[in-house]
Image (tube, rainbow, N blue to C red):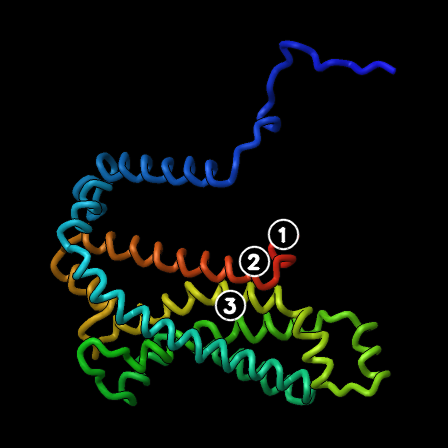
Amino acid sequence: MTTEAPARGRKVEWEDIHLPPWLTGLIGGLGIIILWWILAETVFSGGGIPSPPEVIMAFIDGGWGYFSRHFAVTLAEAGIGYLWGNGLALALAFVVLVIPRLEGVVMQIAIITYCIPIVAVAVLAIVLFPVPALGDPSATSILLAALSVFFTTVVGALLGLKSADKTALDLVTVYGGSRLTQLRKVRLIAALPSILNALQIAVPAAFLGAVLAEFFGKVERGVGVAMMVALQNSNAGLVWALGLASGAVALLGYALVGLVARAVAPWSKGAS
């Protein structure tokens, strides 16, 4: 039995190079920053796009107190809206599995919440809800955060609950189990990956909905308010700093829910 050794001097192809995911992400991030810096200093110089050092200085000038004061309000609004929107979506999805005739009604409600322009909802909510006290969450932002996550969670939960193995469902029925028993014993476990994925996607959506609502006024603190004030003062560095910080917060929340999903249902993320 003989084995052939790999030929020496063989040309290395790009397909042979396997970089770890963290290194790939680091290289991509550095490439974006370099490209951004070049464009800010050349093509868009003086055009409202600050360079990375200017954004860093805006972070430093603003200070931890400034950013934490505004982000605390927006995170509270997004968190409350996230819980309400996802909670109602999951509850309705479970009701549909117990009472299948309600599926059409629930899907119509979900589609309506998705199709109605969120800006129109914000304008109506501002008229209906009172002005919050300084530092308190805005009811308008909570509503928009809830609406931003409702549709995707309803659809994801229903698809997951319907993906249960029919043999297991029939087995529960043979042993006298009800639809509620099927939901608890089979469907919920089968739906965990889809539900967790929907909850993960809902994190940045809820934050974006809360920020968008703050642009319509009636609040004195929040990321949206801070962006508007910075924009009116022509402080492009601070606007970009707030935007990048918002993206980082949304990404962190997305990653945290992903870690929870990996711990609760490791098979949903490819882990054993």
| Residue 120 image offset from top left, x and y in percent | 35, 79
Q: Closer to the N terminus: mark 2 or mark 3?
A: 3
Q: Which three-letter amino acid code belongs to the residue tagged 1?
A: Ala
Determine the CA span between mark 3 and mark 1.
19 Å
Badge 2 is on which residue? 262
Give the residue at x 45% y 59%.
Answer: 256
Give the residue at x 35% y 54%.
Answer: 248
The residue lying toward the viewer, choosing from 103 and 269, is: 269
Q: Which three-letter amino acid code belongs to the residue tagged 3?
A: Leu
Q: Which mark is residue 271?
A: 1
Dot 1 and dot 2 residues touching (CB under 8 Å): yes
Can residue 231 be seen here? The reply is no
Q: Marks 3 and 1: which is nearer the front?
A: 1
Determine the CA span between mark 2 and mark 3.
13 Å
Q: Marks 2 and 3: which is nearer the front?
A: 2
Q: Is residue 131 left or right of residue 180?
A: left
| Residue 272 image offset from top left, x and y in percent | 66, 52
Quarter occupied by residue 234: bottom left
**Residue 130 to residue 40: above or below:** below
Determine the CA span between mark 1 and mark 2.
7 Å
Q: Closer to the N terminus: mark 3 or mark 1?
A: 3
Q: Closer to the N terminus: mark 1 or mark 2?
A: 2
Quarter occupied by residue 33: top left
Badge 3 is on which residue? 199
Within 10 Å of disc 3 (Cα), the crowding (few <14, some 14-19, many 20+) is many
Question: In the rendered view of the protein, which quadrant contains the N terminus?
Answer: top right
The residue lying toward the viewer, choosing from 247 and 193, is: 193
